[in-house]
Amino acid sequence: MVDIELAKAVAQALKRAQKKGALPHFELPETIPIERPKQGELGDFATPVCMQLARFARMAPVRIAEAVVQHLPELPFLASAEVAHPGFINFRLSESWLTAQVEEILAQPESFGSVQLGTGRVQVEFVSANPTGPLHMGSARNAALGDAIASLLEAAGYQVEREYYINDAGSRMQAFYETLYARYAQALGRDEPVPEEGYHGAYMVRLGEEIARECGPRFLKMPREEAIREIGALGLKKVIAQAKEDLALMGIHYDNWFSEQSLYTNGQFDRVMTLLRERGYLDFHDGAVWFKATLLGGPKDEVIVRSDGTPGYFASDIAYHYNKFIERGFDRVIDVWGADHQGHVPRMKAMMKALGLDPERLVIILYQLVTLKRRGEIVRLSKRTGDIITLREVVEEVGADAMRYFLLSRSADSQMDFDIELAKEQSEENPVYYIQYAHARICSILRHAKGMSFDDGDVSLLTSEPELALIRQMIRLPEVVRLAARQLAPHHLAYYAYELAAAFHAFYRDCRVVSSEPGDEAITKARLKLVSACRIVLARALGLMGMSAPEVM
RNA sequence: GCGCCCAUAGCUCAAUUGGAUAGAGUGCCGGACUUCGAAUCCGUUGGUUGCAGGUUCGAGUCCUGCUGGGCGCGCCA
C-alpha cells in the first residue's frame, strides 16, 4: 500500500541524510507514522515524524523535514513532497498514478479492498443469546457487529469462522423448560403455575400453545420430570430454529452452532478440569469447586461447580475456550458481548493464563446496550419480565440494510437509542439510501450505455477535479479495511461508504458520463471505466457491512 | 463503596489511537431538473470538546481529581 511504501521511503531518506551528514546520527524510530491529513488540500498523505525526531536530532523539525525531502528516493506514485510548518511533510499523489488505479480496481472486481494484515485462523463468536426466547435488539447490535468484524477479518487475510454458542445447559434453561411445561399444560386447560423465576413473556404462552397443538396432551400423561425434559427439548429446537431464521432475515449465517451441553457430553469439561487441578488452579471449600483467579490477576476466586454439584456458566466458558484454543486450534478468538457482561472479562483473562495461553489471543468486544424506543418511549429489553420488541419485528419494519447500517454506524463504545418510529420516518433521508442510491445510479448509467464497449477507454483522461476526487476516495478502501480490521471497529466502513457515495454524487453533478456530443467518445469511455470501478468499490464496502448493493431502487 | 464505558454543533454521531484551522448527517433558511435516476446537488447557520489541574514541540485523544449518565460487582447468565 502507498502509505507503507512512503514510510519505507522516509526511513530510507533519513538514513541517506545521516550518511551524507545532512542529519546527525540518532536512532531511527521503528515505524514511521504516515497519516491522511484532515484537510485534503494539504495533500494525500503526511508524516509528523520530523517533529518527533527533533529532540534526538537537536534540530528544528522543519530542517529535518527539508533534509528528508532532499534525500527521498524516486517514487512512481509521488507527485510532490513538501515541508510544512511546524515540521510536517506533505505528500501528493501523481495524477497519472491515480487514474491508473481505475484499471487496477477493474482488474480485481472481487478482491479490491482486501489486504494482508495477517494470517491464521480466527473465530468470531457472536450473538450467542440464551435460547429462552426470541432475539431482541441487543442481539441485533451484536449480530451486526460480529458479522461485520468477521467480514473485515476475512478481507484482512484471515481464515475466519463464525460461531453461535447455544447456552443450552444452564439453570436458566431449566426455568425455561418449566415455564414452557406450565404454558403447555395451561393451553390444554390444566391449572399449572408459571414458576416465579420463569419467563413471563407472552411468547411463552404462544410456544406452549404451539406444542399443545402439535403434540396434543400426551406429555400430560408422563411423569412431570420426563414431560419437562421432552417439552424442553422441543421448545429449545423451536427457539434455535427461530433464531436462525431471524438472523437469516438480517443476512447473517454461521459456520457453526456450538452446543454448551456438548462440552459435558464430549469430555471437554472433564479434560479442562483435570488440567486446572494439575496446575493447582482449583480449590475446594464450602462444598464447591473454585477457580483460583486471584493467582492470575483476577479480582476474586470464582465458583466453577456449585455445592449442589452443578457446573456454573463459568465452568462452561472455561471448557468452551479450552475447546476453541486447544482442541480446535484457533489462533485468535473474538467474543462479542454486551457491556452488561463486562465484569466477566477479568475472569476470562485469568482463565487464559491458567490454560497456558496468551490472554491477547482472546479479544472480547464489548458493545454498549441498545435502548429501544418507540415514539420516544423506552421499551424494556428484559426477557424475564413481560413484553419485548423482537429483532424480527424491527427487521421487518425497518429493513435489514437500514438496520445493519444504523447499528454499525456507531462505535461499539457508544450507547445507542434506536427509535423505530424515527428510523421509519427518516428512512428517505437515511444514509443507507444515499449510499445505495449511488450504486443504483451507476447501474442505471451502465444500463443507459448498454451496447457501448469501453474496454479501450483511456483512464488518463480522468483529470478533472471531481474525477480525481472520486478516485482518491475509491483507493481509500484498503486503508479503511485495514484500520477497521485492526481496531475491530466496523463503524469506519459506514463512514467511508458514505464519503465514497458523496464523492460519486458530486462527480455525477459535474461530469456527464454518457455523452452524445460529437468528439466526446473518448471521455465517455474513460468515465464508464471510472463509474464501473466505483461501483465495484461501493459494492464491496456495502458487502463488508452485510448490506445489499441494489441495481435499481 | 469499587470496577468498566460514555460526555464533542440545537439533535444523532465521527475524528486515521498524541498531530496542522475539531468534521459529517440531521434540523432551520435560501437556491438548482429540457441531457445518464432530484432517494441528488450547491449555499447559509451552528463549538470554551462536561469542569479543574497536569504531562510536551503539540491534547477531543494520555494522567489526576471532580460533575453527570449507562452497565456491572451472585454458588444467575
Image: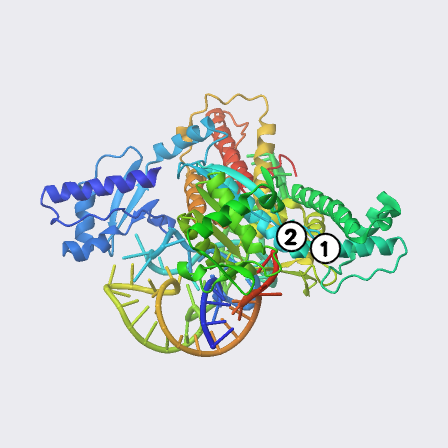
Quadrant of the drawing holding the N terminus of chain A: top left
State the separation of the CA atoms marked 2 and 1: 10 Å
Q: Please give the name of the residue rendered at 71% of the width and 42% of the height, measured from the top-left corner.
A: A241
**Above or below, comparing residue A409 to residue B45 in the picture:** above
Q: Are marks 2 and 1 in contact (CB under 8 Å)?
A: yes
- Badge 2 is on which residue? A130
Residue A224 located left or right of residue A336: right
Q: Residue furthest left?
A: A21
Which residue is under mark 1? A176
- Image quarter of the C terminus of chain A: top right
> Where residue A273 appears, x then y in whole percent?
50, 50
- What residue sits 16% from the left and 42% below the top? A15
Closer-to-camera residue (A443/A338): A338
Q: Position of residue A501 (x, y in %)?
A: 52, 43
Residue A396 versus residue A346: which sits nearer the camera? A346
Q: Taking B62 as reference, is A142 above or below it?
A: above
Left or right of A50 on screen, residue A178: right
Tell me where residue A6 appears, x and y as whole percent. 29, 40
Which residue sits furthest right?
A: A189
Label 2 chain ID = A
Q: Determine crowd level at label 2: few under 14, some 14-19, many 20+ residues with C-alpha closer than 10 A.
A: many
Based on the displayed image, in which of its 4 quarters is residue A60 positioned? bottom left
Spot occupied by residue A40 in the image (x, y as percentages of width and height):
38, 48
Question: Which subunit holds the residue at mark 1?
Answer: A
Observer-nearest of A212 and A381: A212
Mark 2 element type: loop
Evaluate whether label 2 is on the same chain as label 1.
yes
Bin the neighbour count of mark 1 within 10 Å (Cα to Cα): few under 14, some 14-19, many 20 and up: many
